[in-house]
Structures are given as C-alpha cells and as structure tokens.
Amino acid sequence: MNAGASKTPSVKTLSVGSKAPAFSVLTDQGTTIRSSDLLGKSFVLYFYPKDNTPGCTTESCDFRDQYQEFRKAGIEIYGVSKDSVKSHVGFRSKFTLPFTLLSDEDGKMCEAYGVWKEKSNYGKTYMGIERTTVVVGSDGKIRKIYPKVSVTGHVAAILKDLDIHE
C-alpha cells in the first residue's frame, strides 16, 4: 500500500436535483430490479445495516405502518441492505412488510449511493451501511436525502417533508 492510498473507498456524495445512481440488484423475490425499471415512478430507498436488528426492525415497521400513505401519494418503498435474498425473505415475512427489500450483497449499490462508510462502535472501526434514506422522483432525480438517520420519527418526518398527510 503506497503512502497516498486509503483503506476506505472514496465516498460518493449525492445531491438533491442530481440523477439518482443506476443500480441492478436482486429483490426478496429473487428477481432483478434495475433503476431503469423505475423511471416514471417516485420511490424511497431506505438503506439500513442489517435485517432483524433492533433499529432496522423499528425503521422497517415504521415504513410498513405508513406504507399506504406513501402509496396514496404514488410513492413506492424499497428497503436496501447487504443481507441475502434468503435473509430478506425471512425478515419481510416475520414483520409482514408490504414493500420489496433489495439485496445488495456485493455492495455496489451502497457504494454508488455513498452509504458504505467507515463506522465505529466501542472503539472499533469497520465498514458498514450508514442508515440513509433517499427519495427519488419520477424523473429519476433525487428529491430528498436523509443522511445518518435517527430511527425515531424518521418516517413521519419524510411524510411531513413530502407533504403527505397521515
């Protein structure tokens, strides 16, 4: 490793109004979904660290509980993590999640969206998903970005920001 090399990948920065990064990943049904399949549709991508963990379960259930409000506004929800399709199937079933979970096992989508970052916990540093939500408009451009999400009140804040009434 040379002196100028970094152990962390370069962090991409998203910006409101820019084109959302392209992606192609497996869904929890085992089919491939591409960003190009979603052109003409508005959607939310919420990136979360791991299925069946407390914060991720709370966040997913909050999206579940408000899912119909998003749908009435013409917005689809997609949860994204590096968990396997099999893990997603169990997680979705266990918590009756009505939306699709995307499996980014190779991490390319997480890197493209700039959510794969160095994190630290109890003095240890490691690479992981920084909980982030991105709202993409029907034109394929980013409408809102919520970095470093705090789970409590997050879904309600999105509904308020997008002027979707509960």
Image: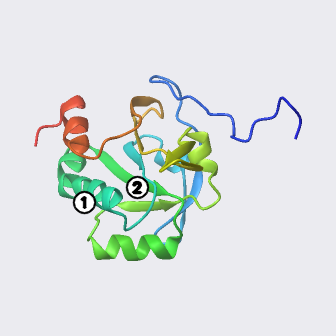
Q: Residues within 10 Å of mark 1 (few under 14, many from 20)?
A: some
Q: Residue at x 37, y 44 (%)?
A: 44
Callout 1–callout 2 Cβ contact below 8 Å = no
Task: Name the residue beneath numbered marker 2.
Answer: 79
Q: Determine which quarter of the picture holds residue 67.
A: bottom left
User: Please, what is the three-letter code of the amino acid marked with disc 2?
Assistant: Gly
Q: Residues within 10 Å of mark 2 (few under 14, many from 20)?
A: many
Q: Nearer the viewer, residue 151 or 1?
A: 1
Q: Residue at x 27, y 70 (%)?
A: 95
**Residue 141, position in %: x, y?**
47, 30
- Figure quadrant of the C terminus: top left
Q: Nearer the viewer, residue 78 or 137?
A: 78
Q: Secondary structure at mark 2?
A: strand
Q: Nearer the viewer, residue 147 or 119?
A: 119
Residue 164 can be seen, yes or no: yes
In the figure, is residue 140 to the left or right of 5? Answer: left
Residue furthest to the front: 123
In the figure, is residue 90 to the left or right of 13? Answer: left
Residue furthest to the right: 2
- Measured along the vertical axis of the image, is residue 17 above or below residue 155? above
Task: Name the residue beneath numbered marker 1.
Answer: 61
**Residue 120, position in %: x, y?**
52, 45
Q: Residue at x 17, y 36 (%)?
A: 164
What colour-coding does the image apply? Answer: rainbow
State the CA–CA distance, disc 1 to disc 2: 11 Å
**Residue 45, position in %: x, y?**
41, 46
**Residue 5, position in %: x, y?**
81, 34
Q: Secondary structure at mark 1?
A: helix
Nearest to N terminus: mark 1 or mark 2: 1
Residue 73 can be seen, yes or no: no
User: Please, what is the three-letter code of the amino acid marked with disc 1?
Assistant: Cys
